[in-house]
Image: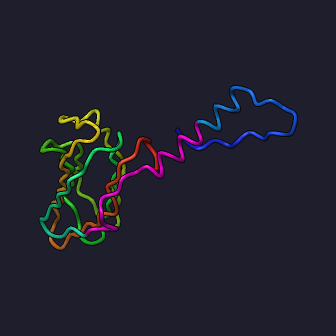
Amino acid sequence: MPWQTCPTFSDGTIGSAAQVNVLSENIEFLYSIISGINIPFTGDQITTGNTRGYTFTRQGRYMHYKFRLTAGDSDEVSIKIDGSTEYTDATNRASAYTWSGYIDLTGTTSNPAVGDEYEVIVYFTPNPNGTVHLDYLIESDATSL
């Protein structure tokens, strides 16, 4: 749920349920941002025909991803969770393309429970000299970061 403008309160007035709900939802929104669990890197570069694998301990509901094609062309990019393809883009993309979005971990084939470890593999099938920069894989309980 997105950030909402906070209601204005003045001395002597009692906040309505709707006003207090806005405050509660904003607190939940802020918590979802700071509770994201980031794997320990600030970026990773994937070049010709490579994959990268990472192990997560499930903390949030959504796995957010962002990676950019920084050189060459791409034939396919996919994300597998515990061996099952949960995201794929087989469209030929040109340099400067950005993939970003999220995967609902409760809807994945393996559906890892909170606290369980699971494997994430990012596959990149480039045309010659293709390079992808993986900006982040991060968990959150919100669909937006």
- Compared to residue 45, the image places residue 81 above or below, namely above
State the extent of the magenta-drawn residues as a range: 25-44
Q: Position of residue 22 (x, y in %)?
A: 64, 35
Residue found 19% across the figure and 45% down from its top: 81
Is 56 colored magenta in this rendering?
A: no
Is 43 colored magenta in this rendering?
A: yes
Q: How is the image coloured?
A: rainbow
| Residue lying farthest to the top in this orientation | 17
- Compared to residue 17, the image places residue 56 above or below, namely below
- Compared to residue 44, the image places residue 5 above or below, namely above
- Tell me if 113 is positioned left or right of 19 in this view: left
Residue found 18% across the figure and 60% down from its top: 124
Residue found 34% across the figure and 68% down from its top: 42
Taking depth in this image into account, of 123 and 38 the one nearest to the observer is 38
Report which quarter residue 9 is drawn in.
top right
Q: Position of residue 97 (x, y in %)?
A: 34, 61
- Tell me if 144 is positioned left or right of 3 in this view: left
Q: Position of residue 116 (x, y in %)?
A: 22, 42
Instruction: Say if residue 13 shows up in the picture.
Output: yes
Q: How many callouts does the rendering have?
A: 0
Q: Position of residue 96 (x, y in %)?
A: 35, 66
- Tell me if 144 is positioned left or right of 56 in this view: right
Instruction: Say if residue 95 shows up in the picture.
Output: no
